[in-house]
Image (cartoon, helix red, strand yellow):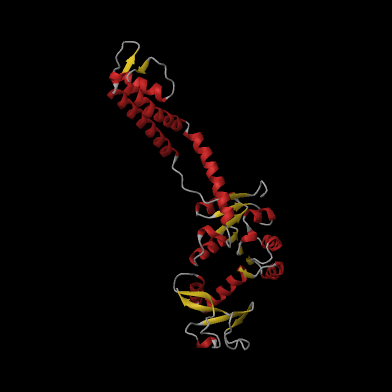
């Protein structure tokens, strides 16, 4: 079970505003009173007032309010069979509903808590092959946005952050989130990391990224971990910790700045490639049976590299040769 300081949170459903909720309950209560009042007026001859024998409009309203509130002083009573039948079959259910409306806040709180527990249990039983994103800052949000553009369902993304404000934002955006320390096993247990397919480490500190990667590998040795690093010297430590791929933000930014100084158009193309869904996209797919035995340059798509047995062979690499069964193509596709 997750530790008390680790909190799992499902995406929030937009609730009614307090004023709207109160107005709706008052409207239901008023409708019940008016309906019961009208029925008593229609059957006023079937009621007896112990004070003067007859039931006026005011008497009918008085009887309705004390009956629906279950007070029932007994000074006005149904005396005919028809009036008693209406009270038994119609007014009594209305009385129960009126009480439910009056104590609706408590009932709603209990119901909401039970519903949340049911949703959590259902989520835990169904979640498989999801993507966990550690950190919901600028990097994490953009990573989630890229995942969504590539077709990753929102209900298969779990955001983990130690900052409750960040996880609250993630819940508002429609993602399951876990509030907890990203270097602790209890946090990953709550995020069901043992069933996850991939983890994106997008935290702000390199030492935290390294510790998080080590903790991830200890729980799930086969999971794919993609991590970011601010400094190039920490990239090797992340790989040694178990990261499958490392993106060095400072070096990447510096290279793009140098490229922009020489060729601004080239930077636009690079940004286009990494911005999924428009213009040019960097795509990945397995080699088809018809492509086996052919050269990468012979295909009808611009191939940049081939992934073979875990190695990435660049275009024109002498070891590439012809395509083999099991290869994956990294190519440029139209967005």
Q: Nearer the viewer, residue 106 or 289?
A: 289
Residue 170 vs 197, above or below: the answer is above
* Residue 37, image x, y percentages: 32, 25
Which residue sits furthest top?
51
Question: Does residue 136 appear in this view?
Answer: no
* Residue 158, image x, y percentages: 57, 57
Is 45 positioned to the left or the right of 310 in the image?
A: left
Q: What residue is drawn where x is 63% and y is 87%?
A: 319
Q: How many marks?
A: 0
The quarter of the picture where the C terminus appears is bottom left
Is 59 positioned to the left or the right of 177 in the image?
A: left
Is 71 positioned to the left or the right of 36 in the image?
A: right
* Residue 274, image x, y percentages: 52, 71
Quadrant of the rendered structure where residue 205 is? bottom right
Quadrant of the rendered structure where residue 33 is? top left
* Residue 313, image x, y percentages: 61, 82
Q: Nearer the viewer, residue 273 or 110?
A: 110
Q: What residue is drawn where x is 49% and y is 38%?
A: 108
Residue 21 vs 272, above or below: the answer is above
Q: Nearer the viewer, residue 1 or 262?
A: 1
């Amino acid at each position: 079970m997750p530790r008390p300081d680790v909190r799992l949170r499902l995406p929030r459903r937009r609730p009614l505003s307090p004023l709207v909720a109160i107005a709706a309950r008052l409207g239901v209560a008023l409708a019940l009173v008016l309906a019961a009042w009208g029925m008593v007026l229609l059957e006023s001859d079937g009621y007896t007032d112990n004070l003067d024998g007859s039931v006026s409009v005011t008497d009918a309203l008085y009887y309705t309010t004390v009956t629906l509130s279950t007070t029932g002083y007994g000074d006005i009573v149904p005396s005919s069979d028809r009036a008693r039948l209406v009270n038994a079959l119609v007014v009594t259910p209305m009385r129960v509903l009126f009480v439910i409306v009056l104590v609706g806040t408590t009932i709603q709180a209990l119901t909401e808590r039970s519903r949340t527990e049911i949703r959590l249990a259902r989520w835990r039983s169904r979640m498989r092959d999801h993507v966990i994103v550690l950190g919901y800052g600028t990097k994490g949000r953009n990573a989630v946005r890229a995942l969504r553009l590539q077709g990753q369902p929102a209900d298969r993304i779990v955001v983990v952050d130690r900052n409750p404000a960040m996880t609250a934002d993630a819940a508002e955006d429609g993602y399951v989130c876990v509030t907890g320390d990203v270097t602790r096993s209890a946090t990953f247990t709550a995020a069901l990391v043992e069933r996850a397919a991939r983890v994106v480490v997008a935290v702000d500190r390199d030492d935290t990224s390294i510790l998080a990667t080590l903790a991830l590998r200890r729980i799930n040795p086969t999971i794919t971990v993609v991590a970011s690093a601010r400094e190039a010297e920490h990239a090797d430590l992340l790989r040694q910790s178990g990261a499958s791929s490392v993106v060095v933000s400072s070096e990447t930014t510096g290279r793009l700045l140098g490229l922009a100084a020489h060729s601004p158009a080239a930077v636009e193309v690079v940004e286009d490639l990494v911005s999924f869904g428009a213009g040019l996209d960097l795509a990945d797919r397995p080699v088809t049976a018809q492509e086996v035995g052919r050269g990468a340059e012979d295909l009808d798509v611009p191939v940049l590299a081939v992934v073979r047995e875990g190695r990435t062979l660049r275009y024109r690499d002498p070891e590439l040769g012809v395509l083999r069964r099991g290869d994956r193509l990294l190519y440029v596709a139209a967005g």
